[in-house]
């Protein structure tokens, strides 16, 4: 009887040790999971990425700029307003054309594109690719009408199409396209 009791205790202890050791092995082998922080892409970076996916000439040499610094070379009079205070802005090149892309507004929900020293044909080419990125719902007919207008004989254009506002001054070669 003592032998059977001793054998039962040895079997129970062996099973307990095996169960505990296999449980410990499972705990040791499991890697703790660490949540990676989600980095939200800025409207400026998203614009550049989508523009470059569809444009024949991509935006390159992109750097961040402080548009509120009057000595930056990218300053405009409206940048003194509070809506531009905490803006995110980058500049880059489309070929040899300098483009400034600005995310601004009280809720940082507005996107603006500025290009200076360009022809109306260059403006039409930029609008052709920038407008559908800025307003995916802009109709093809509205976009084509703006492109036709820019490549026509008109000197100055201010206007809305889709959810966008565009100004182009051919005399100075200044294009501004913004979401509204």
Image (cartoon, helix red, strand yellow):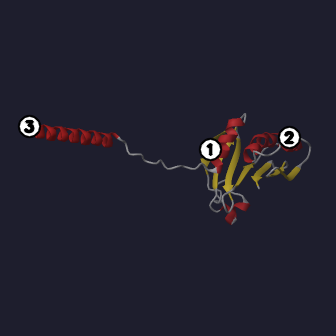
Disc number placed over residue 144 in the picture, else none: 2
User: In percent of the image, x 72 and y 58: which residue is there?
Assistant: 76
Asked if labels 2 and 1 touch by Cβ distance under 8 angstroms, the answer is no
Secondary element at image label 3: helix
> Residue beneath label 1, please?
62
Residue sitting nearer the eye, 111 or 153: 111
State how far apart marks 1 and 3 are (Cα). 83 Å
Please tell me which residue is depicted at 71% across the width and 36% down the height of the picture: 54
Tell me residue 128's x, y (percent).
Answer: 79, 40
Residue at 65% of width from left, 56% of height from top? 67
Q: Which residue is drawn at the image coordinates 21% and 41% (left, top)?
A: 17
Q: Position of residue 19 (x, y in %)?
A: 26, 40
Dot 1 falls on a residue whose secondary structure is strand
- Pointer 1 or 2: first along the chain: 1
Of the residues tagged 2 and 3, which is closer to the observer? 3
Residue situated in front as seen by the camera: 14 or 69: 14
Looking at the rendered image, the quarter that the C terminus falls into is bottom right
Q: Residues within 10 Å of mark 2 (few under 14, many from 20)?
A: some
């Amino acid at each position: 009887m003592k032998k059977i009791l001793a054998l039962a205790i040895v079997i129970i202890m062996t099973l307990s040790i095996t169960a505990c050791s296999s449980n410990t092995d499972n705990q040791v082998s499991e890697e703790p999971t660490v949540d990676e922080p989600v980095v939200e892409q800025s409207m400026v970076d998203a614009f550049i990425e989508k523009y470059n996916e569809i444009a024949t000439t991509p935006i390159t040499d992109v750097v961040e700029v402080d548009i509120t610094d009057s000595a930056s070379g990218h300053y405009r009079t409206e940048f003194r307003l509070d809506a531009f205070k905490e803006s995110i802005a980058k500049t880059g090149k489309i070929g040899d054309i300098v483009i400034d892309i600005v995310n601004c507004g009280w809720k940082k929900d507005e996107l603006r594109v500025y290009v200076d020293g360009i022809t109306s044909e260059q403006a039409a080419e930029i609008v052709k690719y920038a407008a559908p990125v800025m307003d995916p719902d802009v109709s093809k007919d509205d976009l084509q009408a703006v492109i036709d207008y820019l490549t026509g004989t008109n000197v100055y254009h201010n206007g809305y199409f889709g959810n966008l506002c565009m100004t182009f001054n051919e005399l100075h070669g200044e294009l501004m396209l913004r979401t509204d």
